[in-house]
Image: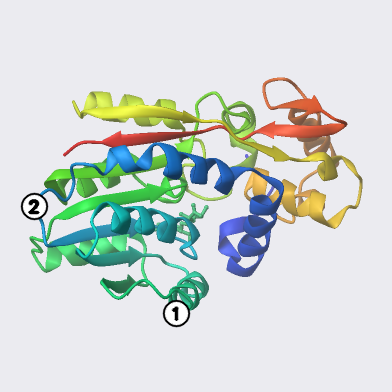
Amino acid sequence: MAASSMRSLSSDNSKYLQAFHLFLERSTEHQCMQDFIEKQFPDIISGIGHGKTSLNVLGIGSGAGEIDLQLLSHIQRKYPGVRVNYDVVEPSSEQISSYKERVAKKSDLDHVNFTWHNKTSAEFECEWNDRKEQKKYDFIHMIQMLYYVKDVSATVKFFQKCMAPNGKLLIIIVSGSSGWDTLWKKHSHHLAVCDMNLLVTSWDMKQILDAQGAKYEHLNLPSFMDISECFIQGNRNGELLMDFLTEVCDFCKTASPEMVAAILEDLKLPGCSQKRDGKILFNNNLAAIVVDP
Ligand SMILES: C[S@@+](CC[C@H](N)C(=O)[O-])C[C@H]1O[C@@H](n2cnc3c(N)ncnc32)[C@H](O)[C@@H]1O
C-alpha cells in the first residue's frame, strides 16, 4: 500500500504541469512523435478524406496542442482547402488556454474550426450519449492520455464507435518494453495513490484490441529521458522528475527513505535505463497504434 501521506501528482495540476514540462525538456518524447508524424503519419491519413469537403477531427487529452497542430498541418497538406472541424477534449483549463494562445499565433488556420471541450473523456462520452449524438470523426487521437481514464477498454471502444467508415484512431502510449513497464510492474502497489491506469502499456492495448477483434497496426517509437539529475541528492529538477516517474507529488519528501532508495536503485538497472556519455537514460519507448473502425 502507498504511504498515507503520498498524494497523486495529477491532483495538483500546477505541479503536474511543471513536472510534465521538465519531462518534455529532458526526454525525446515530442521529438520521437515529430519523427513519426513526418515519416509515417501522412500514409496513415491517406484514406480518411477521400472525396470529402470537410473533415471531423477529435483530440482527446490534447494538452497545450503542440502535437495536435503538427498533426493538423499534415492533414491540411494532404487535403488542401478542405474544412476541418476540430474538437478538443481536455480537462485542464490551463492547457486549453495555452492551446488557444498557440492557435492564435498560427496564420494558416482559416479553414479550421476549433471547439474546445473543457472536460474529461468520460464527461464527453456522457454528454455524447445524453445528446444521442450521431457525428462521426475521420480522425481521432489519444496521445499519452489513456493512463488517466478509469476504464481503458470501454473508453477505446466508445471512441471506435465515433469513427467514420474510413476513419482512423491513433493511440500513442508507452511501449510494453519501456522502463515505465518495468518500474510500474514492480512498484505499483507502493505508488498507486489514485485509481488511474498508470500501468497501461502498448502490450495491454494490444490485448484489449485483440479481445475486441479490432483491426490495428502497431509501430515502435524509440525514445529516452535523461534522468541523471534524479541521482543528485536534493536536486530540484531530479525531484520533479521523480514525481513524474512515480506519479506522486513530492515523492522524495513524502515516501519513506527506503522506498526512494529502492526506486532509485531500480531506475539504474537495464530494465529501466542505460548509461551513455556519462548520462543515465531512462527507456521511454512509445508505441503508436492505429485502429480501423
Ligand atoms: C501527458 S499529457 C499529454 C498531452 C498531449 N497529448 C501530448 O502528448 O503532448 C496528458 C493529457 O491528458 C489530459 N487528461 C488527464 N485526464 C484526462 C481524462 N480523463 N480525459 C481526457 N484527458 C485527460 C491531461 O490534462 C493532459 O493534458
Which dot, 1 or 2, sits closer to the camera? Answer: 2
Q: Residues within 10 Å of mark 1 (few under 14, many from 20)?
A: few
Q: Is residue 211 above or below residue 93?
A: above
Tell me residue 13's x, y (percent).
58, 67
What's under tag 2, amino acid-wise?
Answer: Gly
Q: Which residue is mark 2?
A: 51
For the point 15% across and 47% down, the residue is 161
Q: Position of residue 267 (x, y in %)?
A: 75, 31
- Residue 60 drawn above or below residue 106: above
Q: Position of residue 150 (x, y in %)?
A: 38, 48
Say which residue appears at 46% left-offset and 71% top-offset: 99
Residue at far top of view: 270
As helix, strand or loop, the secondary structure at mark 1 comes to helix
Q: Earlier in the sequence, mark 1 or mark 2?
A: 2
Q: Is residue 8 visible?
A: no
Q: Callout 1, which amino acid?
A: Ala
Comparing 212 with 115, the one in front is 115
Q: Which element is circle 2 on?
A: loop
Task: Using residue 104 as the reference point, say whether residue 19 is left or right of it.
Answer: right
User: Circle 1 sits on which residue?
Assistant: 104
Residue depicted at x 61% and y 63%: 17
Q: Nearer the viewer, residue 291 or 107?
A: 107
